[in-house]
Amino acid sequence: MDSSTFRAAGHRAIEYIADYYEQLASGPVRSDVTPGFLLSKLPSEAPEKSEAWSAIESDLHHLIEPGLGHWMHPGFMAYFPASSSFEGILGELYSAAFNNPAFDWICSPSITELELAMGVWVGELLGLPPSFRGHASSVIQSTTTECLITTMCAARERMVNATVAEGDYETERLRSDDVRNRLVVLSSSETHVSTRKAAKVVGVQHRSIPCDPSDGIALSGTQLQTAVDECLAEGMIPFYFTAAFGTTNSCAVDDFPGIARVKEKHPEIWIHVDAAYAGAALACEEFRPLASGMDQFDSFSVNMGKWLLTNLDCTMLFARNRSDIVCSMKNDCSILQNPVSTSQKTTDYRDLQLSMGRRFRSLKVWFVLRSFGKQRIQHHIRRHVEMASHFTDWVRQRPDLFALTTEPRFALNVIRVSDAAASRMGTDSSSATAKLYDVISQSRRFWLSKTTINGCVSIRIIAANSNSDLDTLRHVFEVLSEGTQSLLDQSAIRSDGEDDGKRCTPQ
């Protein structure tokens, strides 16, 4: 492809992307293909000779598009949002054009220094504690899992080095492998599975602490302290804890003040805040009290591609002491030596991440923050929270059909079929909710996700899609209501009208 062909194809691509977003609401939110649909249409090997771009472009539309799920569709209210913006898309386009791995400052000074500045901007936007502010406190990673692995490695090496040096086990210096075998990562049962996955990658044990998120608080400081005490009594070393600011199932928040008190008692434990989705809400001052005590923690990460309009992938990691990360990630070789790196006058981001090369993600952050500004970002978040509050009201107005499984938080409602409705169906709430989910999942106009909390099957409705509006959310509620009524109509009504006693009430 020469520049003139690229220019023509590029114009068509931009027109297509604009049309895609304008027409997105008129189509289905997800595909109806079956596994293997694309593999059966593709050749078994790459072509021997070049193909015309027109043919490739045609196949994009005819082969690839039918199998796409549309996360920016107004009806997408499953999992968590993957928010996008034209500003973010343009940032990706320019980044791809520059194609610079930017593993140190000398590779491309602008890429390094823009990322340093964006760390300061995002930290200020979210009102993060001063301990997480500054040019040297942040790094943009790809995902939360990468942030967890990076900080877990740093915490592991910090604990191993400190424990071996102190020699506080039976007055003998322990070998590092003995310490590593005793290391334990802690998190609540509601924390995202990425913490457990990171522990596997890092090669340490993981323990899940059972908790009940129904009141909006996931794990208490007392529960964490109990888990720490149990580990120590067994001769294990709790060295890392993931504090959730917005759990996966229900957006519950761990008890930050209580966890801060545990941190005061056990400063050796690395506390990382996983705020992948809900951390964006810290842009609004009214949500910041929920994070009180975070100034004592060690690291914080927020996914800019979920609620902050910056396109996948882009996760900002903040660390209180970046030297801990550098100690575990730094790996020099002669080809990388240069006067700037030796002088330590700036940051070489290869020392703060798993990989060597990296993408120019800070460019799209810069585009988005400048184009939207803090006020529009705050409005964006508050609008979704207000939309979700209407859904909460609708649910509470129909106790004959629905019940809230947990306290609504951060534009997320988690609901189930009420005990009253389930009793009329002759079953329990969990089974009735599972049936309801099967019914509504047949729709291709919206997409919700299912989960289980305290043994209760529940349905999650997240109203944080930048293309959704109140009318779309009302339609979802009406379909849920119609689906529940349909199940009631299909069920045999108990002749004596007695309650069969079946319940799925959060404990």
Image: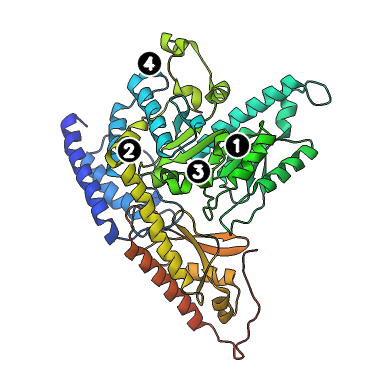
Residue 283 position, x and y percent, is: 41, 43
- Identify the image quadrant of residue 86: top left
Whichever of callouts 2 and 1 sits on the residue coming sooner in the sequence is 1
Residues under labels 2 and 1: Cα distance? Answer: 28 Å
Is residue 337 in sight in this rendering?
Answer: no
Residue type at mark 2 is: Leu
Q: What amino acid type should be assigned to the residue bearing mark 3?
A: Ala
The tag on residue 106 is 4
Q: Position of residue 259 (x, y in %)?
A: 63, 42
Dividing the image into 4 quarters, which one contains the C terminus? bottom right
> In which quadrant of the rendered image does the N terminus lie?
top left
Which residue carries the number 3 mark?
275
Answer with mark 3 or mark 2, whichever residue precedes in sequence: 3
What crowding class fits label 3: few (fewer than 14 Cα within 10 Å), some (14-19), or many (20 or more)? Answer: many
Q: Position of residue 491 (x, y in %)?
A: 53, 82
Which callout, 4 or 2, points at the residue further toward the start of the chain?
A: 4
Label 3 or label 4, whichever lies nearer to me, is 3
Query: Which amino acid does the dot numbered 4 rest on?
Result: Ile
Q: Which residue is mark 2?
A: 369
Residue 271, numbered circle: 1
Amino acid type assigned to the residue bearing label 1 in the image? Ile
Residue visible at 80% across and 39% down?
Answer: 233
User: Could you tell me how far apart the alpha carbons at marks 3 and 2 are, in whole angstroms?
Assistant: 19 Å
Q: Nearer the viewer, residue 53 or 160?
A: 160
Between 62 and 200, the one lying in front of the other is 200
- Decide if residue 238 is on the left or right side of residue 405: right
> Disc 1 or disc 4, which is closer to the eye?
1
Depicted 151 relative to depicted 292: above or below: above
Give the left or right position of residue 3, taking residue 309 as reference.
Answer: left
